Image (tube, helix red, strand yellow):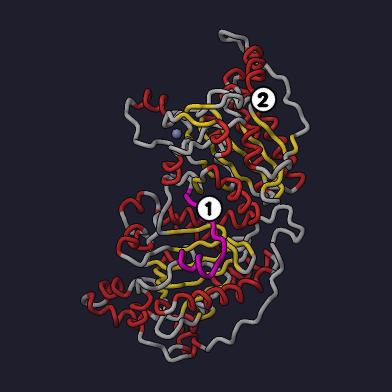
Amino acid sequence: MTAAASSGETLWSRCGGCATLLYRKRLRRNLDVCPECGLHARLAAPERVSQLVDPSSFQPLPDRAVEVDPIDFVDVLPYPHRLTAARIDTGLPEAVLCGAATIGGFRCGLAVMDFRFLGGSLGCAVGELITRTAEQALEAGLPLILVTASGGARMQEGALSLMQMATVSQAIAALREAGLLTVSVLTDPTYGGVAASFATNTDLVLAESGARMGFAGPRVIRQVTGRNLPEGFQTAEFLLRHGQVDMVVPRHALRARLATLLAAVGADRPAGRSGAPVPSRPADPAPDLARAPAPDAWETVRLARHPGRPTTLDYLESAFDGFTELHGDRLGGDCPAVVGGVARLDGRHLIVIGHQKGHTTAELAARNFGMATPAGHRKALRLMRLAARLGLPVVTLVDTPGADPGVDAEEHGQAAAIAENILTLSVLPTPVVTVVTGEGGSGGALALAVADRVLMLQHAVYSVISPEGCAAILWPGRTAAPQAARALRLTAPDLCRLGVVDEVVPEPVGSAADDPEATARAVRQAVLANLLPLLDVPTATLVQRRRRRFRRFGAARAGVRAGLR
Ligand SMILES: [Zn+2]
């Protein structure tokens, strides 16, 4: 599998992927990625470090690897002989290289595993060194980046190797508790005990192109199940599709991507983790849309569903900056109807989560028409919790006909997935602003909308059930949908009067579909105007106010009818 079997002195090496004979220097300049077939050859830890970090910024961990042979293990060779041979072969004292460095100017703790050293196996010394790196990062208030390459726990150290999975995980947990970002970069191969601990229990999991990761190796699975494995099993793309990793990153882009993520948490930035101060600017005096004469509700439903309306990805492109998408629920799926990740708004980092529809039939079908599966709700949940841990505000963009009503969704706990999001948002210790941009369909909408401020575009709708659904149940036929739409009070001005929505965001003449850019500007301005004041509110007060906001929708509000015409 390796592209070059020999050291740098050799002039030529043969690619393990396409067998092309390559000039060694050219291959090295290309970060050991074959220019012909794109094969990412395995890297030694020192090469990996020099590719990832800013020049001469790496400071190795001062500690030496401790000498261990805890169970006097002997197979055909005594374990110490194998260790000595590995040290001579690699020039490294152990299977991991640890220290601190800067990446894109941001300081972080860094541990890089080396597969050449006894298969990158996790023994007591490796566990100890990674744990110390994590502990030092904690002490210095730095994020931690782990680059994994391992066959699993080291057999020659018995159960003590197994314990390292817990030892390192504990150190990761301490960083998570402290709100310090942890990132793992999976490289080929990452298996067994490393996969089932610090390679996957970090805040973010990146897979380098060509990486394979799994708990059990393909050979074992084939033996146990007697079945052939699907094409591309356990590859980076497989992991992305099955919700296991946030993104797949080619080697050339790894350093820049890590720098972007470190920037989001403001590592080592003098101004502090919340980013540059943003001057508060007064919002433009918005027309009092809540008091404007209500347009026909059914006409509004049609505008809200118009395929030309901007989607969440459109807003991420136009109203926000520097969006980095994060994928997966870590449980088995990556729902295309929900997108989310880190973005900037006026220089400030935040987490944006939204339903994604599309403009064409093909796009809509690929996105399940914006109907989230349980995996979509759980991806959103993961990102909400990540935001809270890292102290980033959350903005959600709601545009869904409703949660996915399929058999699969029921089997995977759709109801509980929505319920968990509502619960989590009610107590999420970070500001949350929601904009209903199109359709706010029922529980699927509320799963992203238990917010401190709920805004709604002028021609969006937000309802307990679709007008068609309501008509089918309460009227003699579906043709009564327009009547049901009027009866449900689902327009922005009506919901403003009911207190369900705090502010109506004006749309351009016609509707959002007629001028997406102007709509994006309006959304950006409304989100900023509503988010900035929340950033100064102490967390406990913020959560208390949010709870009060949703407590007030009880029977005590009998008087609201007076406000409706
Ligand atoms: Zn090749």
Label 2: few (<14), some (14–19) or many (≥20) C-alpha neighbours in 10 Å = many
Numbered circle sitting on residue 94: 2
Residue 521: x and y in percent read 53, 76
Callout 2 amino acid = Glu
Q: Distance between the residues labelled 2 and 1?
A: 34 Å
Q: Which residue lies furthest to the top in this view?
A: 76
Residues shaded magenta: 312-329
Nearer-the-camera pick, 193 or 102: 102
What residue is rendered at 45% in x and 56% in y? 377
Numbered circle sitting on residue 151: none
Q: Quadrant of residue 65?
A: top right
Mark 2 in CB contact with mark 1 (< 8 angstroms): no
Nearer-the-camera pick, 418 or 113: 113
What residue is rendered at 39% in x and 55% in y? 373
Q: Can residue 427 be seen in this view?
A: no
Q: Is residue 177 left or right of residue 289?
A: right
Residue 405: x and y in percent read 33, 59
> If you read the primary sequence from the N terminus, does the residue marked by circle 2 or circle 1 appear first?
2
Q: Is residue 303 left or right of residue 162?
A: left
Q: Is residue 451 above or below residue 221?
A: below
Numbered circle sitting on residue 382: 1
